[in-house]
Image (cartoon, rainbow, N blue to C red):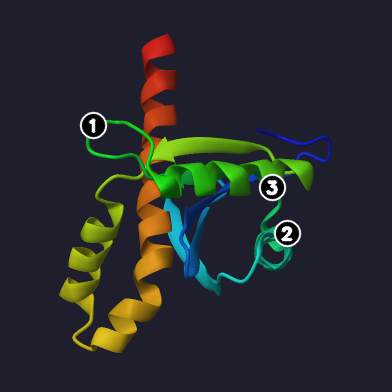
Amino acid sequence: MINSANNVKRIAAIDYGNKNIGVAISDASLTVATPLVTINHKNWLADVLALRKFVEPYNVGLIVLGEPLNEDSTDSKQTIDTRLFGQQLEKQGFRVAYCDERYTSIEARETLREKYSDPNEIKQRLDQTAAAIILQRYLDQQLNNNAKER
């Protein structure tokens, strides 16, 4: 994804929750995801404005929302809420894609426990780390799809 000014458009990912919204950002090569910030969920408009503030400096061309499906791949209430948030993002001009987020919070917690012993530190970083895992899955899928096409 390149814009007309030849600036690389990065990809952001969101782990959307009822209390917090974890945000991660890709590197310029679109291969590595990094946790960025956790936003306290308020309402759709406030959440979209806060998100815009954090991702705008990165020239984001796509936002990947973690899709919280049930184990049997059916929708949960949170899946529906996430899709509604995605629609709000689209109304604000963001391009949106979805990526299965099952088990990302568990994986994020395990990763953070290896790095931090303070439970508060783990709690503060959990959602943005889950967003980074969602984004890394998405980036890896895109790389694999591109490799298969060659």
Q: Residue at x 38, y 36 (%)?
A: 75
Question: How far apart in space, not on screen, are marks 2 and 3 (Cα)?
Answer: 13 Å
Residue 22 position in % (x across, y down)? 47, 63
Q: Residues within 10 Å of mark 1 (few under 14, many from 20)?
A: few
Q: Residues within 10 Å of mark 3 (few under 14, many from 20)?
A: many
Identify the mark at residue 72; answer none if there is no mark. Answer: 1
Q: Secondary structure at mark 1?
A: loop
Of residue 38 and residue 67, the one placed in the foreground of this image is: 67
Q: Which numbered disc flags the more N-terminal residue, 3 or 1?
A: 1
Q: Residue at x 52, y 70 (%)?
A: 37
Q: Residue at x 29, y 78 (%)?
A: 122
View extreme (right): residue: 4
Q: In the image, 129: left or right of 70?
A: right
Identify the mark at residue 93; answer none if there is no mark. Answer: none
Q: In the image, 91: left or right of 70?
A: right
The residue that mark 3 highlights is 89
Q: Secondary structure at mark 2?
A: helix
Identify the mark at residue 56; answer none if there is no mark. Answer: 2
